[in-house]
Image (spheres, rainbow, N blue to C red):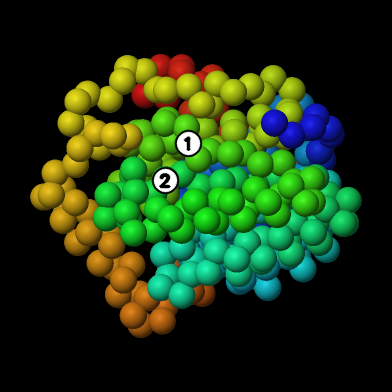
Amino acid sequence: MGETSGPYLRYVALGDSQTEGLGDGDDDTGLRGWADRLAERLAEQDAGVRYANLAVRGRLAGQVRAEQLGPALALRPDLATVVAGVNDMLRPSFDADVVAGHLEAMFAALTASGARVATLTFPDLAAVVPLARPVRSRVRALNRGIREAAGRHGVAVADTYGHAVVTDARLWSADRLHAAPIGHARIAASVGHALGLPGADDSWTHPLLPPLPAGSRGGRHTTTTAAELRWAATFLGPWLRRRLRGGSSGDGRTAKRPELTPVLGAAPGGPVPQGHPRER
C-alpha cells in the first residue's frame, strides 16, 4: 500500500477504455468507470475536488503518452492515475519493455511535476478469456515492468494480479475485456487502498458471495467450447476486423472530461461497501 497523503483536489486520469469507463454504463446514458468512482470517493472527503478524465478507448500506451501526458501536465494535477498496456498486449508486435518505457516516462513526468501517481497491474487474462492463454506470459512481463518502473518513481501500485476475485466472471462485462460495474468498483477500491485514502482497506481483494457455482465461467471454473465460440464471434471477430483495417474503437473520439471540473457526487446506485448485496 502506498503512503498516505493528500488531500487531493486536482485529479487527472490518463489511459484507455478501462479508465474511460467501458462496461460501466454506455455511450447513450454515459460512462462511469473506476476513475469516476475514485473521484467520487475523493469528493466525499473534500467537496472542492476537481476531476478530469483524458482516457480514450483503443489507445496504445505510446498514444496515451503522446496525446494525454501534455494536457495532463497542463492541468497541474496533485493526483494522477496512469493505466495502459492491455491494447498493446493484444498486438503481435507487443514488447513489454517498450510499453513499460512509455508508462515510466509518464510516471517520471507527472511525479516530477509534483503529482502523486497511481497505477495498476493487470489480471491473468487467460483466467477470464481462455483463448487468451498465449498472452499469459505477456501479462506477467508487463506487470513486472510496471512494478519496477513504479518503484523507481514512488508510484502507488494497485497490484491486482494474483487475487482470485479479479478473475471472477461477475466482475467482467459480457465482452470479458472490460470490467462490469462491480469490477470498476473493485478497481476504484484497489487504487484508493494503494493511495492510502481514509477508510480504504484490502476488502477489494475479498471474494464475492455467494461463490460461483461449479462449472461457471471465472477463476478455475470451466467454460464450454460453444460458449467460447459465441464469445469469439460476438466480440473477438469485430476486434480483429478493426485491427486488419488499421482501425480502432477510439477513432474519432476525444476525452469525455478534458477539463478539471467539480465532482457532483456519486451517481444513483453508486459505490457500495465491498461484499454488500448490491454487488451481487
Amino acid type of the residue that numbered disc 2 sits on in the rendered structure: Asp
**Would residue 177 be found to the left or right of residue 74 on screen?**
left
- Residue drawn at 55 percent across, 64 percent down: 96
Image: 280 above or below 123: above
- Residue drawn at 27 percent across, 55 percent down: 131
Query: CA separation, marks 2 and 1?
Result: 8 Å
**Exactly how many numbered labels are in the figure?**
2
**Would residue 44 be found to the left or right of residue 202 on screen?**
right
How packed mark 2 is, by other alpha carbons closer than 10 Å (few <14, some 14-19, many 20 or more), is many
Q: Nearer the viewer, residue 278 or 192?
A: 192
Residue 21 visible in this rendered orientation of the protein: no
State the SS at label 1: loop
Residue 16 is situated, as x and y percent measured from the top left of the image, at: 55, 59
Q: Which mark is residue 162?
A: 1
Image: 153 above or below 180: below
**Would residue 22 be found to the left or right of residue 258 on screen?**
left
Q: Which mark is residue 124?
A: 2
Please identify the quadrant where the C terminus is shown. Answer: top left
- Residue drawn at 42 percent across, 78 percent down: 247
Please identify the quadrant where the N terminus is shown. Answer: top right
Question: Going from the N terminus, do you reach mark 2 or mark 1 first?
Answer: 2
How packed mark 1 is, by other alpha carbons closer than 10 Å (few <14, some 14-19, many 20 or more), is few
State the SS at label 2: loop
Amino acid type of the residue that numbered disc 1 sits on in the rendered structure: Gly
Residue 128 visible in this rendered orientation of the protein: yes
Residue at the bottom extreme? 245
Q: Nearer the viewer, residue 138 or 184?
A: 138
- Where residue 243 sits, quadrant-wise, is bottom left
Residue 69 is situated, as x and y percent measured from the top left of the image, at: 73, 65
Q: Nearer the viewer, residue 78 or 223?
A: 223
